[in-house]
Image: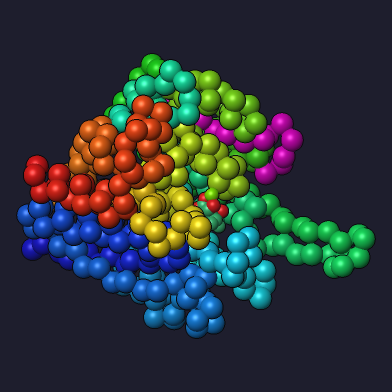
Amino acid sequence: MARTYKIQVLPGDGIGIETVAEAVKVLKVAEEETRGLNLTFHEFSCGGKHFLETGEEWSAEAKAFSQNEADAILLGAVGWEREPGEPIRRSDGQIAGADVVLGTRSELDLYANVRPVKLYSGVPTPLADLVPSDVDFVIVRENTEGLYVPIRGTLKRGRDAESGVDVRVITRRGAGRVSRFAFKLAKKRKHGAPTDGQKRVTCVDKSNVLDGCRLFRKVFREVANDFPRIDTDFAYVDAWTMWCLRRPSYYDVVVTSNMFGDIISDLGAAIQGGMGVAAGANIGDGHAMFEPIHGSAPRHAGKQRANPIAAILAGKMLLEWLGDKHKDRRCHRAAEKIEFAVKAVLSAGLTRTYDLCVGPFAKVEPSTTGMVGSAITELIRAQ
Ligand code: IPM
Ligand code: MG
């Protein structure tokens, strides 16, 4: 009997609303075109605007659904502003909507934030001489501890000696499970690093200075012993940014702590053509949440300008995860259809949002968010 997967849809704020609408449109068509696949969509309002209107970031019902009902969660972006540069904040100073993204990551224990960096044909990259076959690696960002643990505060508020303190916690358990996740991912990936076909996991840290990073690296080494066929590699985070720009083809899987992962995954996004195409997955042992890496971009909101491809690829990752978890080939088939259609639309070059109308595509008339989604659904139907 085919089971039905419940997808919780949390569009959130700003362009999240437009891009997630296209992702849902694409998922629905992929479902229709895949025999035996049943998805139901359960949408809830959340984020900064919702907080302004209701005083809460999301309803108790929405939160309970994420914890008890959803087979997978698709999140757009959270964060809204009163006026440019003035984000709506909770009383503790965090942006309104943080509970949806950061709260869910920690409460559902989604400890691996998986951010693929893959250059598709037809996507302009800012790095000269780079071709799509050079860039295909994945950043695995530890997602539940590091500088994101809520141990922080302000001392001597308002005085000259005022200080802000954020404590970074790295544990053996946290470093161990994310390292193991990275090695298992490297084992599963088919091609290894583009440069030499070698399966490789690179540990990115700052262990020349920080104790937490020394623990992270030590535990990484212990885990590596269980994966003798996989090449292990080490880099300090500052040097890694340089090496990655010089030779992205050397990287296969990169594992790092929370804050470093946040920063280097934006670098990865830029290399693969920008935030408009960068998707991510927050994965735990039981739950998972998928999101485009882009924010809510209030400036662009409601204009049908934003690129929906990141959200659509997040939908593809959602299906892959469901397929792995439930050993369900149908989910994988639907994911393949989506990626095939995305690749075809990108390489054809004609239907693209403004962010990709650069370089050799500077003369292309920008399409709307909806037009890109529709071009992708048409190609899924035509397969
Ligand atoms: C990301 C974002 C979030 C983070 C923000 C919105 C809290 O930058 O997903 O990379 O810092 O993790
Ligand atoms: Mg970020």
Tell how many labels: 0
Residue 242 location (% of width, % of height):
59, 25
Q: Is residue 335 left or right of residue 33?
A: right
Location of residue 101 in the rendering, given as x and y in whole percent from the top left corner: 49, 62
Quadrant (top left/top right/bottom left/bottom right) for the N terminus: bottom left
Q: Is residue 61 visible?
A: yes
Confirm whether the magenta stretch covers residue 96: no
Residue depicted at x 53% and y 20%: 246
For the question of whether residue 227 can be seen, the reply is no
Please tell me in which quadrant of the rendered image residue 343 appears.
Answer: top left
- Residue displayed at 69% across by 62% down: 151
> Which region is colored magenta?
198-212
Q: Quadrant of residue 144?
A: bottom right
Inspect the magenta stretch and tell me whether residue 211 lies in it: yes
Q: Is residue 271 above or below residue 257?
A: above
Residue 364 percent coordinates (x, y): 32, 36
Query: Observer-nearest residue: 47 or 168?
Result: 47
Q: Position of residue 135 (x, y in %)?
A: 40, 27
The quadrant of the picture occupied by the C terminus is top left
